[in-house]
Amino acid sequence: MRKTDQAPQAAEPASPPGSAVDREPARAEPTTEAEAPAAAEATPADVAALSAAWEAICSEIRQRIQPELFETWFRRAALVELSEDAVSIAVQNAFTRDWLERYHRGVIEESVRESLGRSAAVELTVDPELTLPPRSPEDSEAVAAERSAPADLVRQGAATGGSALPDLSTALVRGSDVGLNAKYTFENFVVGPCNRFAHAASVGAGESPGAAYNPLFLHGNVGLGKTHLLQSLCFALLENWEGVRILYLSCETFVNHFIGALENGDLQAFRNKYRNVDVLVVDDIHLLANKERTQEEFFHTFNTLYNAGKQIVLSSDSPPKDIPTLEERLVSRFKWGLVTELEAPCYETRVAILKRKARERGRDLPSDVAGLLAERIDSNIRELEGAVTKLFGYADLSGEPVSTDLARTALRDVFSARRGGPTMDNIVSVVTEEFSVKLSDLQSRRRTATIAFPRQIAMYLARRITRHSLEEVGGFFGGRDHSTVLYAVSKISGLVERDPSMGDLLSRLLERLGERPL
Ligand code: ADP
Ligand code: MG
């Protein structure tokens, strides 16, 4: 494979199926502990001993992981303490430490044991002052030679020595959804504790498609950046790999193409198209719920691509096991590579996103205003973005400078909706009245249609207009788990699509709750 000399920022090739790595990190846990203090003054002899021991440990690590991975995660690390029964390894930031803890602790412990000839407790600490050791020429060559990527992909510019970019808007395989949004790039993506694993994994897959995490499965609530990351990944691939064939589409498009192919009897053409790509990116894969035939087809598409070493990237509003009625064999395949969650951004990340969105518009958002917005709008990044647009629009129209007072006026609706929106009780009272059922019925174990249906409607409404989590909604309706709520939401959404009277019913209920109709 041909590749530039630049090391990936955060790439981790997946280990083969069946290895001991935890394949489904539920969430990227933010780190709160204080950073470790720098190691105490060491004598030259100590330094030499540490450096020799570290070299021995590294040589064991290298035997256990791919060179590219070693480059990314270990080259900047150092052994800072060594005793009979403990070693302390410093890395340059908390993110690296967490990543190593999560994915490579086993390898590190094994390598320490092998090289020292005894077991030792391994502590990982952070030292931002760590410097990158000089790289020997053999090192660079070995790494360049060994880095793996799809055999038939060529690094952008490697063949010609030039750096011409393809026409990004037309480079996607025909049949991809409408072109990519030029704003959805890694540069424009603000990284925080809520999304850093998803971001790092996407960067990794853009660096080494098929060789990094495969499949890469990103999940999270709506408006948290899944589509943004998928498209950034496509841009990175197009920039990095000459002639790469990417099929990027929403799950809905996949379903529609498949149904069309069935109707027209040209399944073969459909399969040729889907199975002849280097990278398949499918957004909102949870829409495969309740679509058995399409799931079956996707299963075969997945296998063909996976076996050929092609990269598959998927996004979903829930983890694989919670997608209602998703076949077990797909659930297990989706977990083969890396499953990672995008969470709601914390306050600091929200402030950073607001400032970035303002900058993208060529504007400056004063810190106190950004703080106010971040405080009031705390779940969805799309809403943050909407608030910025609205605020600047209002400032331009009124000719007033952007201030907290102006924000309070311009965003009155947004702010008050947050506080005074419908509650669970409001939803229950509207639903029980409409269907003549009691709250105790909705919360009971009974599953007869006359009870289950209103319960599903109530769950759907709760997810649509309150900010309660799946768990909270499930808990409220008789201690049901979140997959029951997901199922209810998906079922009612499906009915709305097929049956106009269902849409009318929901609109009526929404209006009674003071919400906009469907
Ligand atoms: P999802 O696909 O998860 O529903 P999107 O990717 O469509 O969410 O994101 C919604 C909006 O929020 C987009 O305009 C996107 O650019 C923006 N956004 C999401 N996450 C980030 C982030 N970390 N940094 C900057 N913008 C973001
Ligand atoms: Mg999306």
Image (spheres, rainbow, N blue to C red):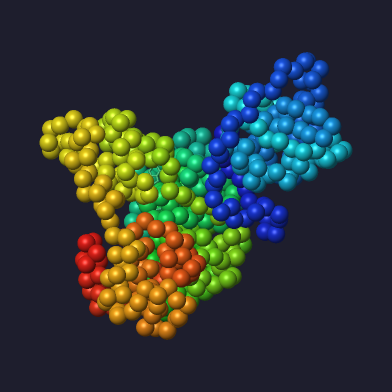
Residue at position x 63%, y 51% from top?
14
- Name the spot of residue 133 as percent of width and height, x first: 67, 25
User: In the picture provided, is 94 more to the left or to the right than 218?
Assistant: right
Find residue 485 and report its horizontal and vertical position in percent. 44, 68
**Does the image show residue 242?**
no
Quadrant hosting residue 373: top left
Name the residue: 54% across, 65% down. 321
Q: Nearer the viewer, residue 302 or 499?
A: 499
Report the label total. Answer: 0
Relative height, residue 497 to residue 472 (above, below):
below
Kindly identify the residue that appears in the image at 62 percent across and 62 percent down. Answer: 307
Residue in view at x 21 percent, y 66 percent: 511
Q: Residue furthest right?
A: 117
Q: From this viewpoint, which residue is outermost toward the left?
A: 398
Query: x, y percentage for residue 278?
Result: 52, 55
The one nearer the camera, 393 or 153, is 393
Residue 228 at least partly seen? yes
Please tell me whether residue 48 is drawn above or below residue 161 in the rendered image. above
